[in-house]
Amino acid sequence: MTPPASLRPSAPRLVVLVTLLAGALLLLLGGRDVAPATAAPVRCETAPLGAATGWTEFVAGDGRRGSESEGAIAYGGSLQAGGMTVGTRLSAAAATPTLVVAGTGGSFNLQRGSAYVGTLTGHINFNGGGSRLATNPLDLPAAFVALRDASARWGALPSTGTASVVDSDATVTPMGGNVLLLTGTNSDLNVFTVTRGQLTGIRATFIDTPAGSTTLINVLGADPVTVNGEIRYRSGNSFIQSSDGTTQRNATTLWNLPAATGMTLSTNAAYGGSILAPRAQVVAQSIGHNLGQVIAQGFSSSYETHQHLFTGCLPTAEAPATPAELLTTKGVDRTTAVPGEVATFALGATNRGGTAAADVVLTDVVPAGLTIGTLPSGCTRDGRTVRCVAGTLVPGDGATFRIPVTVEAPSTPIGGGADRITPYKVQSDWTLDGGASTTVSLACRAGDLLGDGSVRVVDIDPQYGDDRGAIEVRRATATAPGTFDAVLVHHGRGRAQGRLHLACLPAATDGGRGLRTAAPVVTTATLPAGTHELPLACGTDRIAIRPGIDVVRGSARIVGSRATDDGATRRLVVEVGPDGADLTVSAGCLERQTAADRGAVRLGWTTISRTVVVPAGATVDEQLICGEQQKGIVAGWTLAPGVVLAGHEPQIKSRVFTLSSTGTAPRPVELQLLCLDDRTGDPTAIGSGSAQLVNTVNATSTTPQGPGAVLSATATVTRTSGAATRGAVRTATLRSRNVDVVLRCAKGCSGVATVRTAERLRTSGRTYRAKARIGARRFVTRPARTTTVSVRVPTRVRAALRRTRGAQVEVVLRDAQGRRAYRTVGLRKR
């Protein structure tokens, strides 16, 4: 719905104006204004706020309101309000919608226009002669789809001005502390990128831009944002506080938060400028009133919203956006733990690019030694693999998932030592003319084992086009533990050339301990046309290796080959041709424990994966690289339609995949590599209970990523044998100044006791994150004697804990050896 003229702000300036100078010209803080320079023109977007144009409060969901709004308001959910006055500055006709609540509404005094309220629990006084409307005149869900897209687009604009926190005593308007200074010189549009930290704990935000220009303040990231301090605008030789007297500056200032989930206004003064936070719950905690529009997911305020509608100049969507760039992060709330303690991994992905990243998924293979706890919403598990779906991340948007794990007790040593295993590769060339077929064979050294084999198409006569899919691999399978056969048919023209590659394992470690295999897994099937999954399960404590296929009748190809998280099962996905197929698939089974004649030792391994995008009509080589002291022995992949795997080459720490696309659009392919440790386990280290448990998360997206994308991250928990302080914490009591922690150690102990918040805590305009340190003190206990340690904590934290029902704190004890013990306890209050 387009608002009537009486509700719309004055039209944006469509006249061609000047753009920015190359580089930001800083204004002298104590001098006169600098005249803006002229440059190439830009175009302003007409009614950039779309359906929100003309509405002082435009909210997708619920609200809680006190006081009044001078303009029109619209809520897509329910609005708790008791006698709220609406529309005191409007000049709308009686029939014009000026109050819209799609859900349940309270009571209102409507000064101008008419109202739609889905369920009215109170009453409406129509002081301007209006009435209740029978139908909702707004489609707020559709409006917010467009607003979120526009917010993301403006959030991706490059900064054109400077944003820095400075001591206000150095400016022309001292305020007794730091201020955020935004400096821009363009007469049309000045864009600033501001961090959450720059907005917190300051006295004011100083906006130093030419009068008449638009100020766009982008606050990126998904975490909640708190804004402290007044909003002040440059006026002559000083900065003046935003008020109803700064109407033009309020109307041309826009605070844009594309991805933030929360925004708290704690400025203790009028808030200047409109807010576009289409995903955030906006809370006016401590302000004078809002001097601009509030466009948000939710809105809670006991303060007035004044009629300062946005009239600024925002650019049209003409310039191409920069590509999506995911930044993957991984953290853990404790880096050392003893068996039985819980650690929490935080998996995160943020889109730092200028294009939305679609179908973002975080995959985390939790290492052995950790038991996975209750997963958050959006996450599922398959064995030890956790998969968290973030969905589409617009520029600046992010998602975080917290995965709790319990540290397990160490395994029992089996014996032996850290032997070396030396995998290697062998290869041979093949040539095949169009319309012909051939059989090629290759073997590892006598007695050695085959990890996997691959037929790689290197080149096809360019005279007939580079159609690598013309080479049909009818057979690619092991014929013995160390040999591999392939049957190839060339359905195209010209001559094709390629190589047969094998990744091989030695028959024994350098310490003479033999690698062992169990009977291979073989499945024979008659399959109709379509795609079919065929699992090959080797059983407990084994690794599925050398996957193979033999097509006896019809046509089929492997389009997916992935190891499960325990490595014991290889899941093959086979695409069968239109006439069906008779085929056999198989896998060898490598024992995780070597032969026992010299003392058995265990093999270590992990899997790595990465999603790549194959450009339309292109042939590319992509690589996966194993970690330090690891070698790649079995490749895996999941192909998208229109993509052909033209083979893979072991190198041997890494694996190179050749991918060819026949489609008309870029296609994603997920690659996987099973990496074997090149040394066997050290039983002394296993038996002692000390181990580094390394956890890696990988991010995937169906959207091509820019060159700055980071698609994996790692965090490590070190399992220790335990601290003398384990189990020492008995109780914690909140006193007038301290938290008293009661300790008791059977053999006596000493160290440092640290008290941390157990969950996020908000108090006096400050937010303490979970696990935030709030106090610490040294302690010494005598054997089997109870000791009270009084830990001093800040006054505002004590007040918040006292107000919180069921408050908890986490007590961390670090003993003299640096070992830590953790316990979360309910807080007693005295």
Image (tube, rainbow, N blue to C red):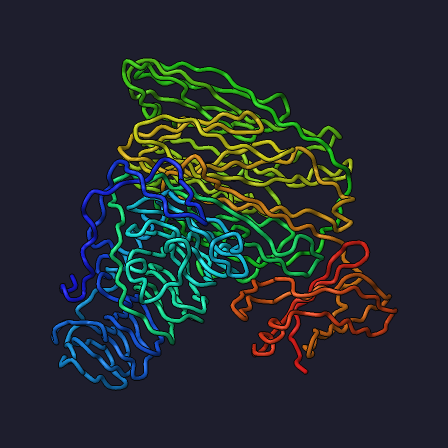
Answer with left or right where residue 337 lies relative to residue 571. right
Quadrant the N terminus occupies: bottom left
Pick the front one: 68 or 316:
68
Question: Which residue lies at the image location 73% right of the left edge and 33% below the top edge?
Answer: 419
Pick the front one: 62 or 675:
62
Quadrant the C terminus occupies: bottom right
What count of labels does the image hold? 0
Q: Position of residue 558 (x, y in %)?
A: 40, 35
Answer with left or right where residue 709 lies relative to residue 43. right
Relative to 687, residue 121 above or below: below
Q: Position of residue 155 (x, y in %)?
A: 36, 49
Pick the front one: 198 or 474:
198
Question: Which residue lies at the image location 58% right of the left edge and 74% below the top edge?
Answer: 800
Q: Position of residue 627 (x, y in %)?
A: 60, 35
Q: Position of residue 609 (x, y in %)?
A: 49, 39
Residue 73, picture quadrant? bottom left
Relative to 180, residue 701 above or below: above
Relative to 296, residue 192 above or below: above
Answer with left or right where residue 496 lies relative to residue 792. left
